[in-house]
Image: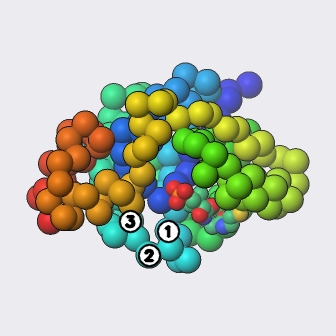
Amino acid sequence: MKRKMLYAGSFDPVTNGHVDLINRSARLCDRLIVAVAENLSKKARYSVEDRLRMLRSAVAHLDNVETDSFTGLLADYAKRRNVEAVVRGLRATMDFEYELQMAHMNARLYENDVETLFLMSSPSYSFVSSSLVSEVFMLGGDVEGLVPGPVLDYMKSIR
Ligand code: PNS
């Protein structure tokens, strides 16, 4: 049986921390869906179209990865796409409580059809978050090396 997994997030914008997790997750399955969540409770800096465009450029080197976006519940999308597991990255203990809460809520919604899989972020990116990267970028700071080159180019082009 083909193993299909999902890595969902805001990707606002996609960072090298995300790309590290995508690379590693793609090795654990036959097909990885990386999906941008249109999260209504969270105000995004970039539109879904821009986030998807940046994401596509960041995963172009991986042939078992597809990109998508979704609205509504992650659990519904995961079930609809028939994935076996949803990957989440953990950077530090600060992520843990929120992630645990979401994993338990999702477990209830998945009805045993899907598993949440946690991967530890690489130490080199443990301080990197989309919100910090975009804040530093908006204020004119250097974020080279924290987001993929084509993503940085795109961010500059629409600034
Ligand atoms: O990259 P993020 O912002 O940490 O990702 C969070 C995300 C998008 C995975 C989470 O907010 C989410 O699942 N949103 C979809 C709506 C939903 O299912 N909410 C209930 C979560 S238990």
What residue is at 77 percent from the left and 42 percent from the top?
115
Q: Residue at x 86, y 59 (%)?
A: 108
Report which quarter residue 11 is drawn in.
Answer: bottom left
Q: Residue 42 appears at what percent x and percent y?
A: 50, 73
SS for dot 1: loop
Amino acid at the residue labelled 2 = Lys
Which of 122 and 118 lies nearest the eye of the viewer?
A: 122
Q: Say whether disc 1 or disc 2 marks the residue closer to the N-terminus.
A: 1
Return the residue at label 3. 48
Disc 2 target residue: 43
For the residues marked 1 and 3, what is the alpha-carbon distance in whole angstroms? 7 Å
Q: Residues within 10 Å of mark 1 (few under 14, many from 20)?
A: some
Whole-number angstrom distance, CA of label 3 to CA of label 2: 11 Å
Total labels: the figure holds 3
Query: Residue 126, relative to residue 10: is it above or below?
Result: above
Q: Is mark 1 within 8 Å of ligand 1?
A: no
Ligand 1 placement by image quarter: bottom right
Q: Secondary structure at mark 3?
A: helix
Q: Which of the two marks, 1 or 2, is nearer to us in this view?
A: 2
The spot of residue 59 in percent (x, y) is 37, 37
Q: Is the N terminus in the top left, top right, bottom left or bottom right quadrant?
A: top right
**Displayed quadrant of residue 124:** top left
Residue 91 shown left or right of residue 85 in the figure: left
Residue contact at pointers 1 and 3, CB within 8 angstroms: yes
**Residue for badge 1:** 38
- The residues tagged by marks 1 and 2 sit, at their Cα atoms, a distance apart of 10 Å
The amino acid type found where label 3 is placed reads: Val
Looking at numbered disc 1 in the image, what kind of residue is underneath it?
A: Glu
Kindly check if marks 1 and 2 are in contact, taking CB atoms under 8 A apart as contact.
Answer: no
Q: Residues within 10 Å of mark 3 (few under 14, many from 20)?
A: many
Secondary structure beneath label 2: loop
